[in-house]
Image: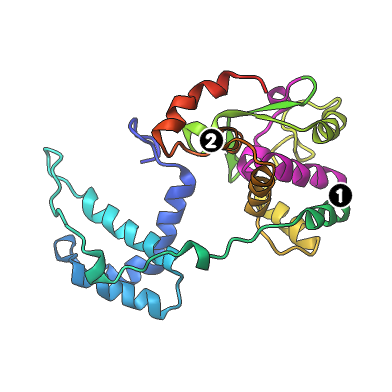
Amino acid sequence: MATRRRKPVKPATIARWRYSLDNWLLPNLADKPLADMTNSVLRDLIGKLTQAGLAPASIIGHVQVVKLVVASAVDDEGEQLYPRKWNHDFIELPIVRKQDQHRPTVTATEVEEILASAKRRYAVLFALLAGSGLRIGEALALKTSDLSPDCRVLRVQRSIWHGKEQTPKTPNAVREVDIAEPLAQLLREYVSGRNGYVFATSNGTALGQRNLLRVLHATGKKIGFHAFRRFRTEVLRRARAPKDLENLWLGHSKQTMTDHYADGLRNDTV
């Protein structure tokens, strides 16, 4: 699935599916033939996952893997061997309520505290995450050649996952991001005389996410990197930034036909 020509699957997604299979689905369903995977079986599985204390979003993710496995069984003509009409009410599939989800973010004061507590190269990385909204894999894959001479614009062209380069998360993630002058000045000073990855180890390879997370937590803030992305979104919303620009800079997918009509924005210089 990672190498197929039509819609190849990202390694991170395959890793999530493997985790779901190894830890939840195979222990509960390995003795079930695909032909016997019915709504009632799925309802029993959801009951077990609920009793185990899993969050609704996690349960939905595991159920989706079951559906994908069942749908993947096809005959020589590509027809599904076990077509199913899943009844979400019958199987009692939980509903994810956005207001109940835990979405940690940071305040401007907390960002300043993080930058003051971290060593310089980590502080520059955290400042970039907060000031640009880049995903952590996009930031770690950033090379000096991706920055404009004045560092006012950066180009997102790749991502890093487990130390390996890959294409960004979605086609919309390939983009140019405008950088505010104070952050651009910080970047100019940091990349002066550097080549290759902007944030690199002593041997020139990209920094590892796991080690960086330990550095972040050492500042006293028990958050994930996505908190910086939420912070950037909140800043843009408070500044009343146009929705099209917000989607462009954050690399969000198009949700409406109007978003598709605004594709020309990608060719504009702001």
Which stretch appears magenta?
A: 119-148
Q: Is residue 29 left or right of residue 94?
A: left
Q: Residues within 10 Å of mark 2 (few under 14, many from 20)?
A: many
Q: Nearer the viewer, residue 131 or 222?
A: 131
**Residue 133: within the magenta?**
yes
Across and down, in percent, residue 204 comes to: 74, 34
Task: Please name the predominant secondary structure of the magenta segment in the image.
Answer: helix
Q: Residue furthest bottom?
A: 51
Q: Quadrant of residue 239?
A: top right
Task: Please name the residue shown 48% across and 31% down the image.
Answer: 171
Q: Which residue is mark 2?
A: 168
Model colouring: rainbow
Q: Residues within 10 Å of mark 1 (few under 14, many from 20)?
A: few
Residue at image x 72%, y 52%? 212
Secondary-structure class at tag 1: loop
Kind of residue at badge 2: Pro
Q: Position of residue 215 (x, y in %)?
A: 77, 56
Residue 167 can be seen in this image: no
Give how far across and how far down residue 235 sits, in percent.
69, 46
Task: Choose between 237 and 188: the one closer to the eye.
Answer: 237
Based on the picture, tell me whether residue 87 belongs to the magenta stretch.
Answer: no
Q: Which residue is mark 1?
A: 119
Left or right relative to 194: residue 264: left
Q: Position of residue 143 (x, y in %)?
A: 70, 29
Q: Residue at x 32, y 68 (%)?
A: 93
Q: Which mark is residue 108?
A: none
